[in-house]
Amino acid sequence: MQVLQTTLLTGPYDWDPKLLPQAEFEARLSRVRAAMDEAGADALLVHGIPGDYGALAYLTNFVPKLGLAVALVPKEGAIRLIVSGTALMLTQAKLLTWVEDLRPAADVPKLVAGWFAEQHGTRLALWGARDMAHGLHRGILAALGKEPLVLDAPLDALRRRKSPIELGLMRESARILARAADAFAAAARGGKGARTVALAFERAAVASGAQDARTLVSAHAGGAPLPIDGPEDPAVDPLLAALAVQYAGYWAEGLLTVTAKPGEGLAKTRAAVAAMVRAAHPGATAASLHRAAAGELGSLAPNPYLGAAAGSAIGLSLEEGRLTADAALEEGATYVLRAGTNDALASALIAVGAKEAQILWSSP
């Protein structure tokens, strides 16, 4: 789901050990260190910014609200977190993480180089640095004198596979999505405008415990879901929407069509999603999911809003990997599978088990 987001993140992001106990993070750290060892890395830098912090949150629970943050992970010993803000703000920052060693960000390349020298290592690896500022990357490279390894592929694969605790949080996020989507649909069927309907969704999500709620809606009948960026409030039928909520860091997302006159397009779209779910198992490729959907859509053209992807992995990020080409479903991962025609959209949020997929939420 691609949607404009606020400059400053708000919401209850403090670490709650009742939801995510420290033992959960210690198990993750052990798996990450095993991957580091296999790649020949002596230390790891995990990067996060307000718009892209999934890797950082996976390992530390820290959500960078004010700017960049980096976690420095040695082969052994304690993690260090460098966070935006002054030393006076560290007390509040510590509420967001189980990590005890927090430092304010000043000259980050210098801090990284000094810490890496303490590790007596020869090779630093990066994770989550796709959106790292060019100047920061260049500064780290200059301070180290060597290009770091990039471990996004193996470490992203680790965080796609959800633990039982994570699956429980995903289920709660899906329950919040269901309640908020019901409020959205009720407002739309009551004749409310698209802007009012979107606000009804967000209010219901927050009232149900969501940290964040995001909405894209049609500006005209059957139009592609778009961000609301003006005061206009047109009543739209069919109203297409992309809805997302976040709970305890974990996202649930769904596509919804609300109309007083359901037709062939919506019926076939729902059937296409059901066919994709039936075809979902470990190893199923994006191509096989596309074929399953196409078998139900027949001659109806797919909705261009969906692009080439059959869906995407989801969890601590809205997109943890797109299902395109030969990308395959992984056991233990959670996905949004999407289908649509020119006037309808639908989706299913699933968890992939050993043999088949379990539906966490699906479009009504």
Image: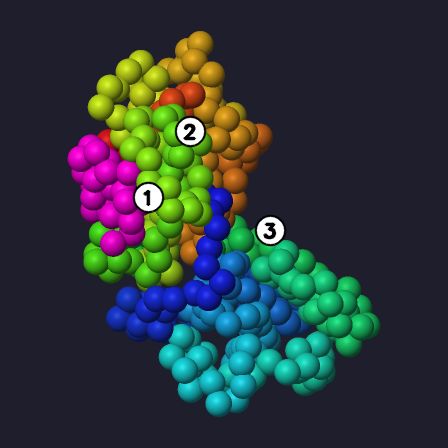
Q: Residues within 10 Å of mark 3 (few under 14, many from 20)?
A: few
Q: Which residue is mark 2?
A: 223
Colour convention: rainbow
Q: Which residues are magenta?
A: 174-203
The span from disc 1 to disc 2 (Cα, nearest Å) is 14 Å
Please state the horizontal and vertical placement of residue 240, each as a whole percent of the image. 35, 32
Of marks 1 and 3, which one's residue comes earlier in the chain?
A: 3
Q: Check disc 3 and report the residue beneath it.
A: 153
Residue visible at 58% across and 60% down?
Answer: 128
Verify whether residue 242 appears in magenta: no
Residue depicted at x 32% and y 30%: 236
Query: Disc 1 designates what residue?
Result: 195
| Precedes in sequence: disc 3 or disc 2 | 3
Q: Nearer the viewer, mark 1 or mark 2?
A: 1
182 up-or-down from 267: above or below? below
Secondary structure category for the residue under label 1: helix
